[in-house]
């Protein structure tokens, strides 16, 4: 390789961001850190900048920017500090950047991810919410650019690895269906009555994966699998009835592709996000990720179950939104973001997350999306409806 590839990490202080830095630090001859961004945990962001010495750091608040500028000056670091959405978009699209890791959680990641695509970067997509909310427009922007989109979500990364090369769509490839595996989360065996009383701490204690709080709650409610179903439809040009969700509690098979000749291809590995991150960074080459070799003899057996949409209605709501399409997935995502935050703040019960989302989807009809404003308006409307549900509930 002739020169080090410059990497921007959007959401560097998060779980995916830190795993990305771990992989990059193993290959200093291949990758350099161009920019790191963080929304909170600014002291941690400062420490990361001391270690990785990026050209830019991006934060959301002016006070945080002032803090970083002072600390950088004291430490003799030349890192420049940028602010807000424009700062995020600038470091995503900067001409010196080769690779952008999109690892901001939620709708806040949409604009910088689109900026990276429009600037023809290699985009490593962890921020599934961005794709779910803007699906058709996101894919149009991708196809109009020469950007490369590589999925980081372990399931989609697995599917990517099991598909023939350059499969923009599964149509015409002899594929019967995509088998999207799900761990089932920490409440897989809980009865409906038990689900009503679970705490944020229980929801965030995932049996196999260590992740941010929002995606941990999504995994527990199975909304994560619902979002991933929509994500898979866009990434692989699949209809929602071509994507089957299968519970696989060990999280060793990260997903599968079922071909018409009866072959089923799977990607296996220990549940550690550094594997898909290393895969997407180096693709089509392979690099060390720090993940230990899979020991199938120790694991012993792999189990499979069908998902229960009665106990986990978020999965049903997401499938409906995938079929409805238009602004429905954006509204589903926005309502879910508000509901998950309310659950984490102990305002509502775990089982009421689905109630909030269902309320919003019933109140607001889906419309086709012709431009990004349609998506952003739907996102705002859904958030306002979800907030009004919560305000009535508090009273
Ligand atoms: P996290 O909460 O650990 O980190 C989120 C990052 O986004 C942090 O750096 C935070 O500062 C930043 N951020 C949060 N709100 C922001 C805002 N409003 N503006 C700008 N930055 C903001 O989350 P995570 O677990 O690393 O997940 C990140 C994304 O990757 C999510 O979309 C998640 O669904 C996806 N993902 C995560 C995993 C995993 O194992 N953690 C697996 C698959 C997909
Ligand atoms: Mg996943």
Image (cartoon, rainbow, N blue to C red):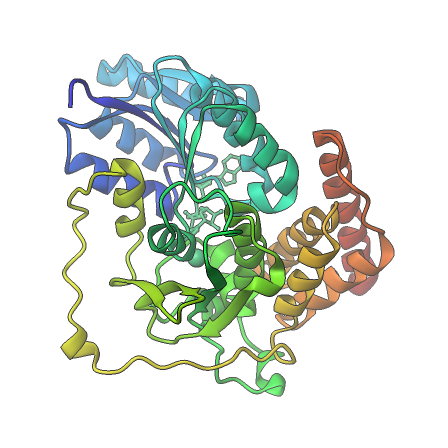
Dividing the picture into quadrants, the one containing residue 381 is top right
For the point 74% across and 45% down, the residue is 327
User: Quarter holding the C terminus?
Assistant: bottom right
Q: Looking at this view, is 232 or 73 the one in front?
A: 232
Please say if 147 is above or below 344. Answer: above
Dividing the picture into quadrants, the one containing residue 308 is bottom right
Please say if 215 is above or below 185. Answer: above
* Count of all numbered marks drawn on residues in the image: 0
Is residue 313 at least partly visible in the picture? yes
**Residue 189 in picture, x, y percent from top left:** 48, 85
Please say if 298 is above or below 139. Answer: below
**Residue 193 in picture, x, y percent from top left:** 62, 86
Q: Looking at this view, is 199 or 374 the one in front?
A: 374
**Residue 216 in picture, x, y percent from top left:** 47, 61
Dividing the picture into quadrants, the one containing residue 146 is top left
Decide if residue 292 is on the left or right side of residue 122. left
Q: Looking at this view, is 275 or 377 the one in front?
A: 275
């Amino acid at each position: 390789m002739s020169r080090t590839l410059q990497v921007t990490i959007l959401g560097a202080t998060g779980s995916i961001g830190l795993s990305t830095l771990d992989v990059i630090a193993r290959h200093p001859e291949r990758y350099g850190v161009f920019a790191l961004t963080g929304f909170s945990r600014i002291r941690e962001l400062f420490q990361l900048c001391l270690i990785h010495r990026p050209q830019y750091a991006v934060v959301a608040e002016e006070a945080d920017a002032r803090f970083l500028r002072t600390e950088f000056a004291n430490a003799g670091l030349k890192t420049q500090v940028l602010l807000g959405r424009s700062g995020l978009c600038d470091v995503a699209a900067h001409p010196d950047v080769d690779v952008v890791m999109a690892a901001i959680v939620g709708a806040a990641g949409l604009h910088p991810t689109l900026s990276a695509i429009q600037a023809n970067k290699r985009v490593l997509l962890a921020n599934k919410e961005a794709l779910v909310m803007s699906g058709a427009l996101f894919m149009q922007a991708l196809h109009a650019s020469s950007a490369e989109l590589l999925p980081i979500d372990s399931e989609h990364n697995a599917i990517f690895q099991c598909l023939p090369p350059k499969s923009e769509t599964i149509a015409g490839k002899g594929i019967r269906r995509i088998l999207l595996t799900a761990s089932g989360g920490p409440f897989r065996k809980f009865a409906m009555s038990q689900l009503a009383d679970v705490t944020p701490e229980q929801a965030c204690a995932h049996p196999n994966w260590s992740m941010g709080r929002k995606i941990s709650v999504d995994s527990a409610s199975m909304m994560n699998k619902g979002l991933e179903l929509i994500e898979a439809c866009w990434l692989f040009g699949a209809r929602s009835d071509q994507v089957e969700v299968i519970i696989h509690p060990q999280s060793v098979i990260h997903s599968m592709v079922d071909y018409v000749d009866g072959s089923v291809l799977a990607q296996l590995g220990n549940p550690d996000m550094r594997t898909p991150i290393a895969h997407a960074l180096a693709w089509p080459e392979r690099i060390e990720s720090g993940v230990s070799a899979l020991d199938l003899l120790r694991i012993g057996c792999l189990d499979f179950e069908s998902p229960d949409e009665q106990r986990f209605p978020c999965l049903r709501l997401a499938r409906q939104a995938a079929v409805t399409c238009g602004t429905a997935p954006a509204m589903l995502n926005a309502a879910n973001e508000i509901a998950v935050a309310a659950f984490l703040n102990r305002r509502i019960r775990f089982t009421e997350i689905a109630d909030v989302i269902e309320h919003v989807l019933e109140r607001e009809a889906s419309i086709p999306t012709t431009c990004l404003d349609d998506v952003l308006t739907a996102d705002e409307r859904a958030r306002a409806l979800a907030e009004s549900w919560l305000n009535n509930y508090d009273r």
